[in-house]
Image (tube, rainbow, N blue to C red):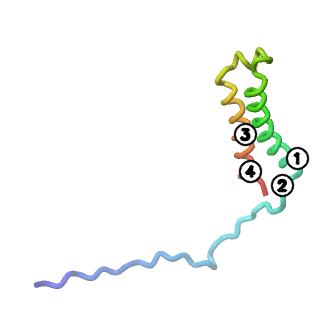
Amino acid sequence: MPKSKVRKKTDYTINPASRIPVKVKAGPSPVWYVAIMLGFMLAGLVWLLVYYLAADQISWMNDLNAWNFLIGFGLMVVGLIMTMRWR
């Protein structure tokens, strides 16, 4: 039986000395960023609590019906997305 041909494998490793350093903005996030981030999360929570507890007394909120869930959870999601940029 004939022997199969042996293939040469090319080495694709990257030389670590040839990498270009990337400047990264280091440092903590400003205080106002954290305050806004937490504010969005708390505003969403408060919106849902008010909807559950007092929607009968607030006519415009009662008219929104299920849109209140979108508004409340949307505010909280905006706050959670902001946490990805928090340092």
Q: Nearer the viewer, residue 77 or 61?
A: 61
Q: Is residue 77 left or right of residue 5?
A: right
**Above or below, comparing residue 4 to residue 59 in the picture:** below
Residue 46 pos. (x, y %):
79, 34
Cα–Cα gap, marks 2 and 4: 10 Å
Task: Report helix, strand or loop for mark 2.
Answer: loop
Which quadrant of the view contains residue 61?
top right
Say which amino acid is labelled 4: Thr
- Label 1, on which residue? 32
Camera-nearest label, 1 or 3? 3
Q: Which label's residue is closer to the chain start, 3 or 4?
A: 3
Q: Residue 76, labelled with which disc?
A: 3
Which quadrant of the view contains residue 16?
bottom right
Say which amino acid is labelled 1: Trp
Cα–Cα gap, marks 4 and 1: 13 Å
Q: Residue at x 79, y 18 (%)?
A: 58
Q: Which label's residue is closer to the chain start, 3 or 2?
A: 2
- Label 2, on which residue? 29
Q: Which label's residue is closer to the chain start, 4 or 1?
A: 1
Camera-nearest label, 3 or 4? 3
Cα–Cα gap, marks 3 and 2: 19 Å
Q: Residue 83, labelled with which disc?
A: 4
Say which amino acid is labelled 2: Ser
Q: Are marks 3 and 4 in contact (CB under 8 Å)?
A: no
Say which amino acid is labelled 3: Met
**Above or below, comparing residue 3 to residue 56 in the picture:** below
Cα–Cα gap, marks 1 and 2: 8 Å
